[in-house]
Structure formats: C-alpha cells, structure tokens
Amino acid sequence: MANILIVDDEAPIRTLLGKIVNKDGHEVMEAEDGVHACETYRDAEIDLIITDLVMPRKNGIEMIMELKKDRPGIKVIAISGGSGFSGQIDLLSVARLLGAKHIIKKPFTVDEIRAAVNDILA
Ligand SMILES: [Mg+2]
C-alpha cells in the first residue's frame, strides 16, 4: 500500500483517479494545482504523484521541477490531454525528460492507470 498524491485542476478527474487507486488499497491525497501539491508533498509522506500538467497557478512541469530539487528520486506519473501542447512544446515529453516514469494521455483507461501505478511502485 502506498500514499498517492493526485494532482489535477478538474475535480471529477481527481475523484476518478482516486477511486481507481483506492480500489487497489492505496491511500489517496488530492491537490487542485501545483502550489497545493508542493505544500502537501512537503507535509506528508508521499510515495507517488499522479499529476495533470496543465493547471492554473503552478503547472505540472513547474511542480515536478520544484519537488525534484529536494527529492531527486520522486516518483511521478504524468497525465495530460489534448491541451498538453503549450505552443510547440509537448508537455508530456517534457515531463518524461524531467523523470516522469510513465506518461499517459487523456482520456486514460482504468487499466492504463493501474498498470502504471503497479509498475512504478514495484
Ligand atoms: Mg488541467
């Protein structure tokens, strides 16, 4: 069992992701943007972050960069949709360069999420 932080500015997606990993016995915490996620990550024992990339205040890329300064071995699964492109930059590719072990495109399937979580925690 792991403590998983789910970060997405869309509440229904947080709820869905939470249900998927909770069913496998993991504890779930939620944050609605990168600012809240960084605060939560520092205050709690988080084993894995599943994060959206396009979010207000602090996006997923900025969040990963900030958290990696203190915890280089941070475990991240990055998820993003059609808006994962910021200008000409593919944010999922950037997330991979920053160390996100799995990158998943929206709309995701339950099996994709479970497989990525099981692999990264194995
Ligand atoms: Mg978003």
Image (tube, grey):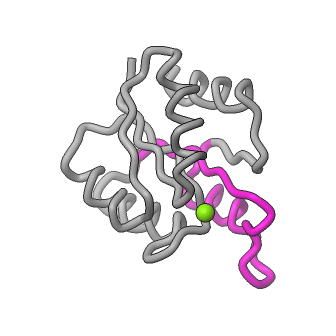
Q: Which residues are magenta?
A: 73-101
Residue placed at 60% from the left, 25% from the top? 119
Which is more toward the observer, 92 or 30? Answer: 30
Q: Position of residue 27 (x, y in %)?
A: 37, 26
Q: Position of residue 57 (x, y in %)?
A: 44, 77
In which quarter of the view is residue 2 placed? top left
Which is more toward the observer, 62 or 16? Answer: 16
Q: Position of residue 98 (x, y in %)?
A: 56, 60
Q: Is residue 80 on the magenta stretch?
A: yes
The quadrant in which the N terminus is found is top left
Residue placed at 39% from the left, 53% from the top? 31
Q: Is residue 116 on the magenta stretch?
A: no
Which is more toward the observer, 99 or 62? Answer: 62
Ligand 1 is found in which quarter of the picture? bottom right
In the picture as drawn, the residue positioned furthest to the front comes out as: 12
Residue 83, placed above or below residue 48: below
Q: Position of residue 100 (x, y in %)?
A: 58, 50
* Left or right, residue 81 beside residue 75: right
Residue 65, placed above or below residue 1: below
Residue placed at 41% from the left, 35% from the top? 4
Which is more toward the observer, 45 or 68? Answer: 45
Residue placed at 62% from the left, 60% from the top? 95
In which quarter of the view is residue 29 placed? top left
In which quarter of the view is residue 69 placed? bottom left
